[in-house]
Amino acid sequence: MHRVHNFSAGPAALPDEVLEIAKEEIMDYHGQGTSIMEQSHRGEAYTEVDQQAKERLDRILKLENRFHIMFLQGGASSQFMQVPFNFLDRHETADYINTGVWSNKAIKEARLFGNVHESYSGENEAFRRVPQDSELTFHDQSRYVHYTSNNTIYGTQFSGEPDTGGIPLICDASSDFISRPIDPKKYGMIYAGAQKNLGPSGVTVVMVRKDFLQSISKENIPTILDYRTHAERIFNTPPTFAVYMVNLVLKWVEERGGIPHFQTLNAKKAELLYSEIDRDAFYKGTAEKNSRSKMNVTFRLNDEGLEERFIKEAAKNELVALKGHRSAGGIRASIYNACRLESVEALVSFMDHFRSKYG
């Protein structure tokens, strides 16, 4: 078996241990003679997988059974539309904190359904940072406050939940989900595409607080887009294999000590990388230091003409998927939960070697 050091932003690295289990079970799930992919989504085997995954999420995030947990499709992009479709009416206003491309996409969709007040926009600063609480302004009768907790393109991340003064938070947590603790009481809803920290692409975790779900007053929501439909039961055929993989990843997270373990590990990985970047002027981080992400480390070379060579030589050393997002350029190392410490150490060693060679 040949496994490289994978720094992909998503679909991202999965734990080796999880892939080994999936390999063993892909032809014969628990002695049943079929794959989980070949069984009814209403059958006993898949029903157990679905329930286990929801129970594990509830434990890991300390939700205390206060949220409906759903496994939907369409990624975060569908949620950009589905959130305001359910929770925002024409005469109502929602606050959106604009910290980059994904926030902008969410804002565009929300404006189709109601009024949007931008609590903050980092556009004039090229989205190099996230706001302090003192910079946020909210509408007097805001329905909710939407924010993106981690920005994969710009390498920025909120260090904690924004202070909304009690207005329910809705969070696109796609790229830092289950990497650090959250305060569930502050949220009306959290959603996350699985393909960063949680599993393969194809499934989106949606968690809606039960009392917040009850605040939906609209009657003209198409059945499949109504969160109440999915809160009641598995409405349509889910991406069964993706949910199966999510369940295995959640089991892996619990076995390693849950969020406290990964919070410590992720901080260590990020510190190693940022320390190497900050050693001198050869590398330069793109995000302001107090906004730096522990999931997506973005940087440039002082001589940007060397960046393509950096990426190619890194790949020759089995360090792959380091090219920055097409809209931002540069280098990006995504170090989600499943990215091993050894991979980050290998990258830091290569960066040191590359500096000595070309610096």
Image (spheres, rainbow, N blue to C red):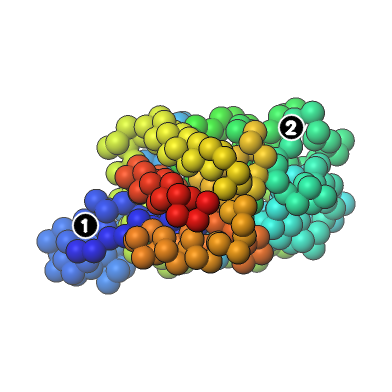
Q: Which mark is residue 335?
A: none
Amino acid residing under circle 1 = Glu
Looking at this view, is 218 or 78 the one in front?
A: 78
Q: Residue at x 71, y 29 (%)?
A: 163
Please report whichever mark, 2 or 1, sits nearer to the chain's N-terminal start. 1
Looking at this view, is 341 or 9 the one in front?
A: 341
Q: Residue at x 83, y 37 (%)?
A: 138
Crowd tier of the residue under label 2, counting other residues whose Cα lies within 10 Å: few below 14, some 14–19, many 20 or above: few
Q: Residue at x 21, y 56 (%)?
A: 21
Drawn side of residue 32 relative to residue 205, left or right:
left
Marker count (numbered): 2
- In the picture, the quarter occupied by the N terminus is bottom left
Residue 15 vertical position relative to residue 41 in the rendered view, above or below: above
Look at mark 2 in the image and give the residue it sits on: 132
Amino acid residing under circle 2 = Gln
Q: Can residue 277 be seen in this view?
A: yes
Drawn side of residue 33 relative to residue 211, left or right:
left
Expressed as whole percent of the image width and height from the top left, the position of residue 75 reads 55, 62
Q: Residue 20 carries which label?
A: 1
Looking at this view, is 247 or 48 the one in front?
A: 247
Q: Residue at x 84, y 47 (%)?
A: 117
Expressed as whole percent of the image width and height from the top left, the position of residue 5 reads 35, 56
Expressed as whole percent of the image width and height from the top left, the position of residue 181 reads 49, 32
Q: In which quarter of the image is residue 114?
A: bottom right
